[in-house]
Amino acid sequence: MKTNRRDFFKVTGAVGAGIAAGGLTSCSQPQAEPSAMQFIKDAAVNNNPQQFNMCGYAAPKLDKVRVGFVGIGDRGSGAVKRMTYIEGVEITALCDIRQAAVDGAQKILSDAGLPKAKEFVGDENEFKKLCDSGLCDLVYTATPWEWHVPVGLAAMEGGAHAALEVSAAKTMDECWQMVETSERTKKHCVILENCCYDFFELLTLNMVRQGVFGDLIHGEGAYIHDLDYWHFNKPQDEKMTDGAYTKMWRLYENQRKANVYPTHGLGPICQAMNINRGDKMDYLTAMISDDFTLKNRIEEKAKEDPFFEKFIGMDMRGNMDMQMIRTNKGRTILIQHDVSSPRPYSRIHMLSGTKCFAQKWPLQHIAFGHDVVDEAGMKELREKYEPEIIKRVGEMAKQVGGHGGMDFIMDWRLIDCLRNGLPVDMDVYDAAAWSSITPLSEWSIANGSAPIEVPDFTRGAWKTNKPVELTLAGGGTTKVRNLSNANAEGQLDV
Ligand SMILES: NC(=O)c1ccc[n+]([C@@H]2O[C@H](COP(=O)([O-])OP(=O)(O)OC[C@H]3O[C@@H](n4cnc5c(N)ncnc54)[C@H](O)[C@@H]3O)[C@@H](O)[C@H]2O)c1
């Protein structure tokens, strides 16, 4: 039973197949055998040794970064636009299953005075041609979740770095495939976790680094976002290709009883705790509530519009799921996920240390002991601890927009790292560990909240890997193009 855990975790992709067919599916449950304790023992044994350590790896410098985009819907088109502001970027290739999406991206390029990119429009495997074209140094993927890893693997095999939207992977097998392919090809596989670049998250990360928090004890993160409007934003055309989520993909994904979107809350906490770089997640336990809203909403919508009748009877995930994670250094993390309850947005972002406490939602504050820092104190803290990246591009990022600026900071930093041959902030081990919460939580939930080990994707290298760099040392040279037509568009909620 030592090497079968990848198979054990393989989720069949039935949800994905359902989306592709435009039909109804139910998500397969992972088996509940062997017992959790047996499984935890087995999971301590790694499959293959690390081939090459991608943490801290500096790929050869690229003066120009030729970027290809796969999946240019809501999120991907925003990324194309942001990249037009970054010098040293050449947008060379655009791929989508919809011509309209590619046309929209070409317009973004022409509006910015940039040349047309080569188009790859066809079926769902058209991205392979883009990845094999030799046109790209970086393939930036913003498809529905089921395509992230297939595109990322093809990109790395084709000689490009891969950048994958969140969550990077859906299954444990995909997590290992990313790790093994990145190590073998020596191509970065970056998770595009924009929340790691938000202003308060970066401020608190730097404060942790400077010792202001003392020892970190506990962190909390979340993705609590009432997506009702987006889930039910019906496509207007017959092929179901417009609307908020193309072919209603996200409603289908909500059949899976797991935290299907763990990384917005988890990523910044992992960076603060040096997960994979001095500490690691050891094990988790997960729990989910029943569904109190989604089935009812589907029935309500079906009464208004027969389009929604096909969703009746779908076995939806419960509203709220939670994961409790214990780290090797004895810290704890709580992650919450709820996209279907009528309540205000929150990613919590709470850090609790021996000397300092910070929390972003519902009310942003920092405290020392019982004393909450006032406005003047916050100003002082920002002046003292705002990291260099915010000083360098923070104001420009606010003008470009994208969730208040953090999306642009993330893109700029990624390009600057590639251009200056710097290690990336969010490497393949982060992509795998953060994404693995989905299959791990699914297993724990299916097994009465039994604890389950989080695999060590670094295979021991976490003990010596260096923390995320916050100084821009060796980089910071990438300029931002004329911002005169920037309009800071993009909602503040992620
Ligand atoms: N980081 C964030 O803040 C954030 C915010 C929104 C969405 N996202 C992520 O971005 C991704 C896309 O979400 P979205 O809201 O833009 O969805 P969307 O449905 O608007 O866009 C997806 C696009 O991918 C295209 N597509 C589907 N399959 C494809 C394939 N095989 N090859 C090429 N193109 C394909 C679709 O036609 C569509 O244009 C998701 O992973 C989502 O989780 C992240």
Image (spheres, rainbow, N blue to C red):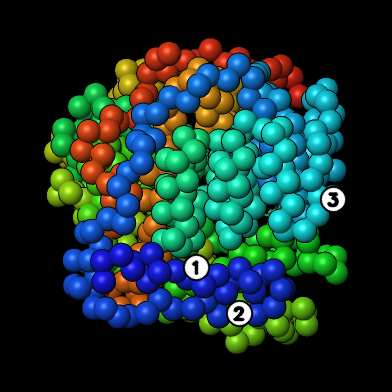
Q: Is mark 1 within 8 Å of ligand 1?
A: no
Residue 120 in percent (x, y) is at 79, 45
Amino acid type of disc 3? Gln
Q: Secondary structure at mark 2?
A: loop
First reached walking from the N terminus: tag 1 or tag 3:
3
Q: Is residue 473 left or right of residue 38?
A: right
Amino acid type of disc 2? Thr
In depth, the one of 389 and 43 nearer the eye is 43
Q: Is mark 2 within 8 Å of ligand 1?
A: no
Q: Is residue 46 left or right of residue 167?
A: left
Residue 338 in percent (x, y) is at 46, 64
In this picture, is 20 found above or below 195?
below
Q: Secondary structure at mark 1?
A: loop
In depth, the one of 298 and 94 nearer the eye is 94
Quadrant occupied by the N terminus? bottom left
User: How many angstroms separate mark 1 from mark 2 (CA)?
Assistant: 23 Å
Q: What is the total number of numbered labels drawn onto the structure image?
A: 3
First reached walking from the N terminus: tag 1 or tag 2:
2
Residue 345 in percent (x, y) is at 49, 54
Q: Which mark is residue 341?
A: 1
Q: Report the residue marked by disc 2.
A: 25
Picture residue at 72% right of the left edge, 38% below the top:
133
Mark 1 surroundings: few (<14), some (14-19) or many (≥20) residues within 10 A: some
Amino acid type of disc 1? Ser
Q: Report the residue marked by disc 3.
A: 99
